[in-house]
Amino acid sequence: MTCVALASPLEYPYEFREVDVKTLDSILRPGSIAVVGASRRQGSIGWQILHNLLTYGFQGAVYPVNPRSPTVHSVRSYPSIADIPEQIDLAIVVVPASLVLEVVGACRDAGVKGIIVITAGFKEIGGKGVERERDLDAALRDSGVRVVGPNCMGVMNTAPDVSLNATFAPSMPPTGPVALISQSGAMGVSILDHAESLGIGISQFVSVGNKMDVSGNDLLEYWKDDDATGLVLMYLENIGNPARFVRVGKAITQKKPLFIVKSGRTGAGARAASSHTGALAQTDLVTDSLIKQAGAIRAETVEELFDYAMAFGNQPLPKGNRVAIVTNAGGPGIIIADSCEAKNLEVAPLTEETRARLSARLPEEASVRNPVDLIASANAESYEYALNCVLDDPGIDAVVAAFVPPLGILARDVANAIVRANAAHQEKPLLAVLMGKQGLPAGLAELHGADVPAYIFPESAARALSAMWRYAQELGRPVGEVRSFEIDDTEVSRLIAATREAGSTKMSEADSLRVLEAVGIDVVPWSFVERGESLVERTQKAAGEIGYPVALKAVSPEVSHKSDIGGIEIGVSSDAECAASIARMIDRVTTQAGYPIEGFLVQKMAEKGLETIVGTTRNPGMSPMVMFGLGGIYVEVMRDVVMRLCPVTDSDAARMVREVKMYRLLEGVRGEAPRDLDALEGVIQRVSELCANHPEIAEMDINPLVSLATGATAVDARIRIEE
């Protein structure tokens, strides 16, 4: 076996293109800007964008372009971009859709390096819009001009030496470490407003719109080495280039966290699937898997996205999962404790020294165990003292401070106490929960202004802290290697060709098992007996050679799930039982259900173990996905599966095995021996290599793959090839 380091794009052969991301400087760090379609009509997009460039102090030159107005916003205007005497870095196009192609061509001819097409009316509307966007792409192809949009709201860069607000958003958030991508313009405005209300500082913002050229992947590459960007938030409606997304995501998340809200969870797949893997790949599992494989964290909602942003943007990562809770009410303390435990955080015991320090200053009624309950009479001084005590505790890695305002105690005073404790302990994360009696709690502004993440609900703080711990564990882990195995590709190609020659896309069960053997996957001893004369005698002979007891399976090209129609009998232990089983299955499958039987598969009864599944499928426009999970007949019901995009590295395979809910069973429970995880990981990687070597394979299931204390044995396989 040889190992190949995951170091070059060649190991991601699907849909990959090299991009010089420095070309994005023309859009995000321009020295000069032309606003083509600048308007004197207040409230119009052409007016608002020029207004924002001037109001927020863009550090370069701004040139309005309007053939009917000599000045716009008291700035000299030009009839066309060709009339501007200076070289233009960035053109912002705000003209009707029917004029965009002409304007963009003029920008290209004038040597403009970057273009933002704000105008809508392109592929998002279908029909004529699709043609417009195709023509626009053709006009700029090979020109070297980078384009954001069309159908977008623009870009921002809050760096003081740039101060760029090239959007029609009504305001500009403060500068900070968070970079934002939004595929939706409307969501972009909402996200920026939310960031400003929470005091979250933004480094750069890009509304990518239709992503004709500049994509989210381009921006991730650009921000990977951007010192001003500490974390990235994305709102996506689709992942346009999954292979590149995984590659770039792995690279950026080794340096800074990436959070994603992906809409469209419930969209149904357009293609019918014949395998479990193919069916499950039509669900949101694929999106989840791509995000995990990239090392990113998925947020369920935009609110959750900002819960993460507040914590990661302002606090250090925890060095462990041991959490202390300080509160003035028992209820919130219990809720936070429950939420932490549910998120794999430990509400750890405090040291005797810490409890003694707390007891020395707190009322007798207070609880000095974790959670620390200061009781309702606790004032700001009590909070500050208690927080300093638990933050000093060497057995605590992070602290959550919760406050419910009682009569006579001001939330702002407690907030300032939390701020002081945070300033004195910069090495540990401190999160706050302020629960107001009426409306938005007081004290939030003080905390947000002092870089202390503050939440209204206890669960939000626990969720954010859990994400910080998960990300801290990921940092420094190896990306992994793509392993190469000894595979008989000649035999696999022969079996694929035989299926095609038979005029079928569904490989026979016998040939599917032969493919597994050619790949080096252990298969339970088996024999296939074609239907014909002396069927019973030949089947009995095969069973005797394999050794009773055996499993008998009726093979029909029209039946995928044999158990549904009684096409399987197990534990057949003699020639007499073999003959009786054949008769019963012929009656159930052919006479009652009406399906033809080609023959019978005779298999040695598999050693008792845990049934798993390994499969692969290809979605349109994507490289193959490999699936692993709980196997058997209920796989689509239980959905305890994970997926990864090919090629699957050894690190990817190890994580797949450990991400499923049944992982504790694989570790061994109630006296059972642990399963051979290396064997499962090996099967996953062999299937990944099979997919890469043979793109004709559209879908495959190995189900069940029986996981044993030593090894893993395939019992059944199903393969569909492309037409």
Image (spheres, rainbow, N blue to C red):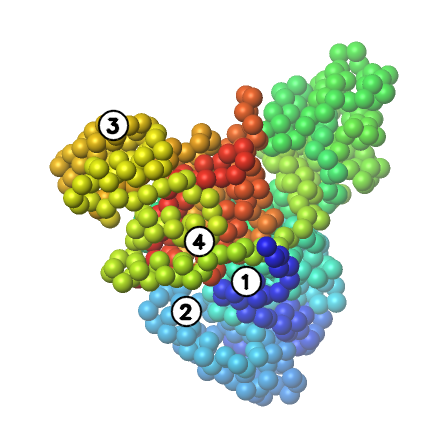
- Check whether the beta carbons of the residues at disc 1 and disc 3 lie within 8 A of each other: no
Please, which residue is most extreme toward the top here? 364
Dot 4: element: helix
Image quarter where the N terminus lies is: bottom right
Disc 4 crowd rating (10 Å Cα; few below 14, some 14-19, many 20+) is some
Which amino acid does the dot numbered 2 rest on? Phe
Residue tagged 3 = 577
> Which residue occupies 65% across, 84% down?
87
Q: Earlier in the sequence, mark 2 or mark 4?
A: 2
Which amino acid does the dot numbered 1 rest on? Tyr
Dot 2: element: loop
Q: Nearer the viewer, residue 644 or 373?
A: 644
Residue tagged 4 = 518
Q: Earlier in the sequence, mark 3 or mark 4?
A: 4
Residue 12's mark? 1
Which amino acid does the dot numbered 3 rest on? Glu
- Relative to 507, does residue 656 appear above or below in the rendering? above
Dot 1: element: loop
Q: CA distance from mark 1 to mark 3?
A: 52 Å
Residue tagged 2 = 122
Q: Is residue 53 left or right of residue 412?
A: left
Q: Nearer the viewer, residue 557 or 387?
A: 557
Q: CA distance from mark 3 to mark 4?
A: 33 Å
Q: Position of residue 66 (x, y in %)?
A: 53, 80
Q: CA distance from mark 2 to mark 1?
A: 31 Å
Residue 554 in sight in this render:
no
